[in-house]
Image: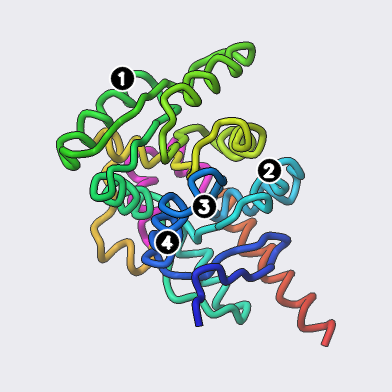
Amino acid sequence: MDNSHKKVNIWGISINPIRKDDFIKVIDNHISLHPEKTLHITGVNPETIFQTLNDSQLLNAINDSDLVNIDNTLVLLMLRLSGVRTPERVATPDLFESMLALAEKRGFSIYLLGSKEDVLTKAIENIKLQYSGIIIAGYRNGYYKREELSKVCEEIKKVKPKMLFLALPTPDKEIFIQNFKHVLGVPVLLGVGGAIDVKAGLVIRAPLFFRKIGLEGIHRALQNPLNYGKRYLTMYPAFIWFVIKEMFKRKNRF
């Protein structure tokens, strides 16, 4: 049976507990067979899930996605503790890399939106070095005014990319995709957030062993304790407590 579109509804969110290879198969087939339609992919981590508790617009944007990847080991563990079978974490930086490789292999053009100009241009430079055959249809930094949104959309529509990657913060990237995905004419849209910082060399990802045992967040926090450290110390415990309460609620219902 094909599990590529398997969904689980938990914590008010529809999540796809599937492997990265399944995501790539769906993306490849979608662009090849249904380029006139939109495939919206969103990654969730403890921060985004916790934010949805007080941000209905973000929650709606996530649930309006076609696919939702598990972007964090803690989310993976909490899903398993809650009884959800999940084969692996699909971290957004890893999904981003696989999509870039697919774009190069299949000749799918890409567009990047967001981040600072110098960070974005450095990321693009590194992407071109790693994927020499990739077609970059265009890019724009994330520092535009609200009244420029229509112009940004027109720029994207004009170059007709097959994949759009948004390096905007949460909830900006989720809401942007929800609001404009049906007018951009782009087959696949993914919010990549800090993955652009990784491609630019601004953030160094944890070694593979650290990622597998769920310590990638600590590695990142050590690089930028004022930003990531504060967020992890506040939102991660809050997320764990929320999940525990949800588990007890479910248990008491049966």
- The amino acid type found where label 4 is placed reads Val
Q: Pointer 2: what residue?
A: 58
Q: CA distance from mark 1 to mark 3?
A: 25 Å
Segment colored magenta? 215-232
Q: Residues within 10 Å of mark 1 (few under 14, many from 20)?
A: few
Residue drawn at x 34%, y 37% as measured from the top left: 109
| Residue 68: x %, y % from top left | 55, 57
Quadrant in the rendering for residue 161:
top left
Q: Pointer 4: what residue?
A: 90
Looking at the rendered structure, the secondary structure element under dot 1 is helix
The tag on residue 118 is 1
Looking at the rendered structure, the secondary structure element under dot 4 is loop
Q: Residue 232 or 15: which is nearer the viewer? A: 15
Q: Residue 125 or 110: which is nearer the viewer? A: 110
Image marks 4 and 3: residues in contact by CB distance under 8 Å? yes
The tag on residue 43 is 3
In the shown orientation, is residue 244 left or right of residue 202? right
